[in-house]
Image (spheres, coloured by chain):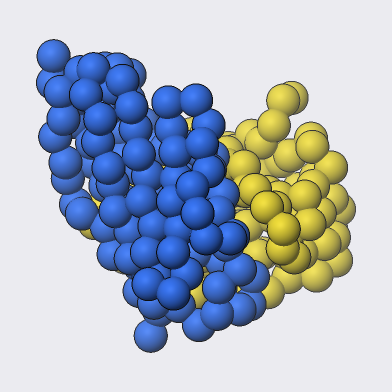
Amino acid sequence: GQNIDQPTEMTATEGAIVQINCTYQTSGFNGLFWYQQHAGEAPTFLSYNVLDGLEEKGRFSSFLSRSKGYSYLLLKELQMKDSASYLCAVRDSNYQLIWGAGTKLIIKP
Amino acid sequence: IAGITQAPTSQILAAGRRMTLRCTQDMRHNAMYWYRQDLGLGLRLIHYSNTAGTTGKGEVPDGYSVSRANTDDFPLTLASAVPSQTSVYFCASSDSGTGGADTQYFGPGTRLTVL
């Protein structure tokens, strides 16, 4: 079967750095996505990785290792508005997205 | 309209009733999707359409049907609602549905409760 694993919840302090991990086992791989979802709102796109390595976009970076079936999302200089759920999704061999359950990130002052 | 709209925002429905959730996008995207999101689970794909006139089944299609008569609209119908269909439903669209970055953009969601 196909599986995406992420921690259920993480807590971090405002101004700090946090790393959210995602491991996957899917039938085929055609890219990995990270989305942010604030409570009661729609998911919004953060990043896309298809090759191994780090993609940096402002305070957010995403890393991929295809051989290990592993990705992480790194958030720097945390702000209170970063309190949200972060969703990892992998595009499989049928070009459909398989979604993790999401990691709820709580930022404390 | 900017992006994707969904209607209604929320609905309480008696079991056995028929219900259509509406979704409209103005980005001229070829591909559209319907997901349900339940607590503790990832988004699950119900149905999708890679282009107007075609549809396909996702992971959890039973009890749902869709149509794609034109590029902009992708309604989801529950023929006879059951309590297990209580969920938040998200419609999404993407440019091609066939690879590359092909980012999916989401509507605001419909919160459906079936009693």
Compared across the picture, whether B107 is left or right of A3 comes to: right
Q: Position of residue A48 (x, y in %)?
A: 56, 49
At 27% from the left edge and 57% from the top edge, which residue is drawn? A6
Viewer-proximal residue, A68 or B21? A68
Q: Position of residue B38 (x, y in %)?
A: 32, 55
Which of the 4 image quadrants contains residue B10? top left
Which of the 4 image quadrants contains residue B26? top right
Viewer-proximal residue, A20 or B80? A20
Q: How many marks?
A: 0
At 31% from the left edge and 20% from the top edge, which residue is drawn? A77
Quarter of the image that includes the N terminus of chain B: top right
Compared across the picture, whether A94 is left or right of B68 comes to: left
Q: Position of residue B104 (x, y in %)?
A: 62, 48
B31 in relation to A3, above or below = above
Chain painted in blue in the figure: A
A109 in relation to A45, above or below = above
Which of the 4 image quadrants contains residue A83? top left
Q: Position of residue A45 (x, y in %)?
A: 54, 40
At 50% from the left edge and 54% from the top edge, which residue is drawn? A53
Is residue B112 visible from the viewing direction of this image?
A: no
Viewer-proximal residue, A103 or B91? A103
Is residue B46 visible from the viewing direction of this image?
A: yes
Compared across the picture, whether B103 is left or right of A39 comes to: right
B70 in relation to A58, above or below = below
Quarter of the image that includes the C terminus of chain B: bottom left
Residue occupying the far front of the picture: A53
**Colour for chain B in the figure:** yellow
At 28% from the left edge and 22% from the top edge, which residue is drawn? A78
Residue occupying the far top of the picture: A109
